[in-house]
Amino acid sequence: MTLEELQEIKAGEELARSQKKKSIHVCVAAGCMSQNAEAVLNTIEGQLKEKGLAKEIDVKGVGCMGLCAAGPLVSIEPENRMFQEINPANAFLVTDNLEKGKKTTNDLASDSPFFKRQYKIVTENCGVINPERIEEYIAFDGYLGLYTVLHDLDQNEVVQNLIKSGLRGRGGGGYPTGLKWSTVAKAVGSKKYVICNADEGDPGAFMDRSVLESDPHRILEGMAIAAYAIGADEGFIYVRAEYPLAISRLKVAIKQAERKGLLGNNIFGTTFNFTISIRLGAGAFVCGEETALIASIEGGRGTPRPRPPYPAESGLWGKPTLINNVETFANIAPIIRKGADWYASIGTETSKGTKVFALAGQVVNTGLIEVPMGMSLREIIFDIGGGIPGGRKFKAVQTGGPSGGCIPEEFLDIKVDYESLTKLGSIMGSGGMIVMDENSNMVDVARYFMEFCMSESCGKCVPCRVGTAQIYDILTKFAERRATEADLTLLEELCDVVRNTSLCGLGQSSPNPVLSTLKYFKHEYMERIQAEVNQE
Amino acid sequence: MPAYPVKVQPPTEDKRWGLVMATMKRHGYQSNAMIETLHTVQESFGFLDDDSLRFVSKALNVPLSKVYGVATFYHFFTLKPQGKHTCVICMGTACYVKGAGELMETIAKKYNVHPGETTDDGNLSLVTARCIGACGLAPAGVFDGEVNGKLTVADTLTKLTKWE
């Protein structure tokens, strides 16, 4: 592959597009897929054939359009007219209304705040390109970043670029990506590895899945750039076995990239070699922790080990290893293409760029959104999310999954970035955002998360294995109204012990849901105690 | 460890072992291929029985205890045969907030089966999932491999009745 060939593919795609009058996009990401999007796609194709429009109008399946709640989604391009809840029976609404004008019952305002308030970097191609065709990714400047890096920048310049961009790890920790890369780049050793962490275990988070399903080549390109920067020649994507669609699209993408010479030996005619293989997870939340993930790739039980040594020095098979999250890798190519200064201009002082959130729970517009760092929770939930359905009252928003906390209404106006959420006792996490209304009981919510941590604890260290079970038992006492004042004190002490003495992030952060609900919703715990006193 | 991998014969003549052998071969019979191999075994046979664990242990030259450890560590692997039909109810946070618990209770009560178990007649396995990533469609479930969102108690029961 050369630059000319890359441009040729792009020009070819643009020509093909210009020859079609319009193009109909049908969302075929997992959310819409489970609502029969494939049948919609076939029906629309059939109807166009009947009308004799098959040559003028292009129909294609695209990645996630974001508003999963209203799926399956269909849009007519280039005017971006959107339709919601299309099924094979009402697909004629789309094909009968190709020309502007008549409003239908299933129109979806594409200028609503849900779409207008977003800022897309990671998901820029989601809902735009067909994820199973590498040509379309190339048509949107795909692999141009990799070319630039290989031909115009040396390894140190790539790392410096990343440091300047201010990108921080999107998996939850928020460690500066450039710093991590430079540590691995400096590590001694001829063999190094790049790992993409796609073990998205947080219940309530589906950002990584959507990106993998909608734009898999973006991840491959990001990993290849990382490999060049740190001097690795082998990469792994560790992906959950629960995401069959993402796995199959990744496999297709890797094959296509290999065939085009964008993975393999002598990429872009340089001496740079890089291969990527997929490793399947098997349903263990703890494998999202980097040392556990490495143990799992090595074929064993996914149990973490103490750090240091960090994987940057001694990772996969004892070699220096770079591990980044899917979303982090998805940010790399745009940073290279558009420049570190551009990226650093978005977001807040300490947190740059955008963040993808999976908005779910008791909110009108559930789905996938990408917003600049620094947007307030209120804007996210009420403007983009459309507020709480059924006129009920907002109670709390849970961020960061089982490691995060619940944030009550009085803090809705804080600007979302890594620091502000940590200050509130929650974390940014990987980006799950669950909205709860007045019907949710916070003690039950805390108990739900503790049950999760208890069952997902790998059992290696005592504080986590025993502590989570004990906390769960105490919370059950509260749920059953058997708790006493002493239990409350014990609960607080226990949380403190588990937090400070556990081996890995799972244990250390497992008390967060309890501590944050204790902090903001203590009265709900107290009610359960008082109930017992009254009974006596 | 022997210098050359010892060729181990599959426990039965079943053709599906060919798939398992192919996976191990692709990874050069390395011990780190264990999880991938177990995935293939489960895909082909539906579950991991003692014979298959013994076979994987020999073929990859890994102690049986370690294979058993891995097979029981990960939720995705099951050592018991699954029922004719499988109903997975997602218990992720979004689904939980939207009433997946109630859904689960109703099914468990009606079919007299606990989550993670199979009915006595071997017809239905009820499984919980941590999160299937369909949070936008909560509550969600997977019925024999087909993902369905926005479930209500009524339409879940309708689906299950069809399997009876």
Image (cartoon, rainbow, N blue to C red):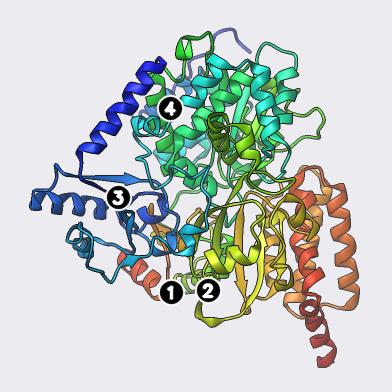
Q: Residues within 10 Å of mark 4 (few under 14, many from 20)?
A: many
Q: Amino acid at mark 1?
A: Val
The label shown at residue A254 is: 4
Q: Is residue A242 above or below residue A99?
A: above
Q: Position of residue A472 (x, y in %)?
A: 75, 64
What residue lies at 53% left-to-right and 64% top-to-bottom? Answer: A384
Q: Are marks 4 and 2 in contact (CB under 8 Å)?
A: no
Q: Which residue is mark 2?
A: B102
On residue A77, the disc is 3
Q: Which residue is mark 1?
A: B153
Which chain is home to disc 1? B
> Does any portion of residue A192 appear in the rendered image?
no
For image coordinates 78% across by 71% down, the residue present is: A520
Mark 1 crowd level (few <14, some 14–19, many ≥20, 10 Å Cα): some
Q: Of the residues tagged 4 and 2, which is closer to the observer?
A: 4
Which chain does the residue under circle 2 lie in? B
> Would you call the spot at circle 2 few (<14 residues within 10 Å), some (14-19), or many (20 or more)?
few
Element carrying mark 2: helix
Describe residue B62's horizontal placement relative to residue A103 as left or right.
right
Q: Are marks 2 and 3 on the same chain?
A: no
Q: Position of residue B146 (x, y in %)?
A: 37, 54
C-alpha gap between disc 4 and disc 2 = 42 Å
Please identify the quarter of the rendering in which residue A159 is found: top right
**Identity of the residue drawn at 65% across and 40% down:** A287
Residue type indicated by callout 2: Glu
Kindly check if marks 2 and 3 are in contact, taking CB atoms under 8 A apart as contact: no
* Percent of width and height locating residue B53: 54, 34
Residue B44 lies, with reference to residue A86, above or below; the image says: above
Answer yes or no: do the residues labelled 2 and 1 have beta carbons within 8 Å? yes
The residue at 76%/68% (across/down) is A517
